[in-house]
Image: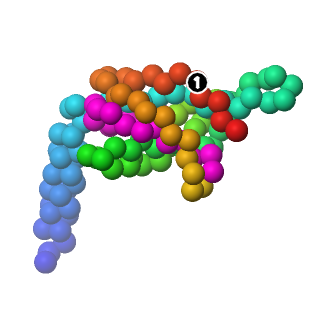
Amino acid sequence: MPKDRLVRLGRYLAFILLLTQGLGTADAAVVRGRLQRFYPNRALAPAAGIPVTVWCVQYGRSAAFYSLYDGMFYLSNIPPGYYHLEIWVRPNQPMVYPITVREPNTDIPPINVP
């Protein structure tokens, strides 16, 4: 196959991929919140680097988002519905909270993690 045909085919496939990605985000929301640690001296500090996911029967588990330096997490392109927010402080045993995702944003109150 000539090189110019391969380039055109690649561009066409990239366009189709972008088009289908855009179709799935029309009814989607962002889930955002903050993780914090409570220390013995009664100080609260951001909990960074902790994986956070959402899970439901219909859509399965989202990709993990690791909390940022300020403890914030953002899960995007989540369809509205009922989910379990999973905070993976321990590898095989997440902290689980039931949440309802609504468009355009769902704000989770600050969560204390061990």
In the picture, measured across the screen, residue 113 lies left or right of residue 106, that is right
Q: Where is residue 89 in the image (x, y as percent from the top left)?
A: 62, 46
- Quadrant that contains the C terminus: top right
Residue 66 part of the magenta segment = no
In the picture, measured across the screen, residue 2 lies left or right of residue 56, that is left
Q: Residues within 10 Å of mark 1 (few under 14, many from 20)?
A: some
The main secondary structure of the magenta stretch is: strand
Q: Which residue is drawn at 38% across and 49% down?
A: 61
Residue 83 part of the magenta segment = yes
Q: Where is residue 112 in the image (x, y as percent from the top left)?
A: 65, 30
Q: Which residue lies furthest to the right in this view?
A: 41
Q: Which residue lies furthest to the bottom in this view?
A: 1
Between 68 and 10, the one nearer to me in the picture:
68
The answer to whether residue 66 of the structure is visible from this angle is no
- Quadrant that contains the N terminus: bottom left
Which region shows up in magenta? 74-90
The answer to whether residue 35 of the structure is visible from this angle is yes
Say above or below: 39 vs 89.
Answer: above
Between 63 and 1, the one nearer to me in the picture:
63
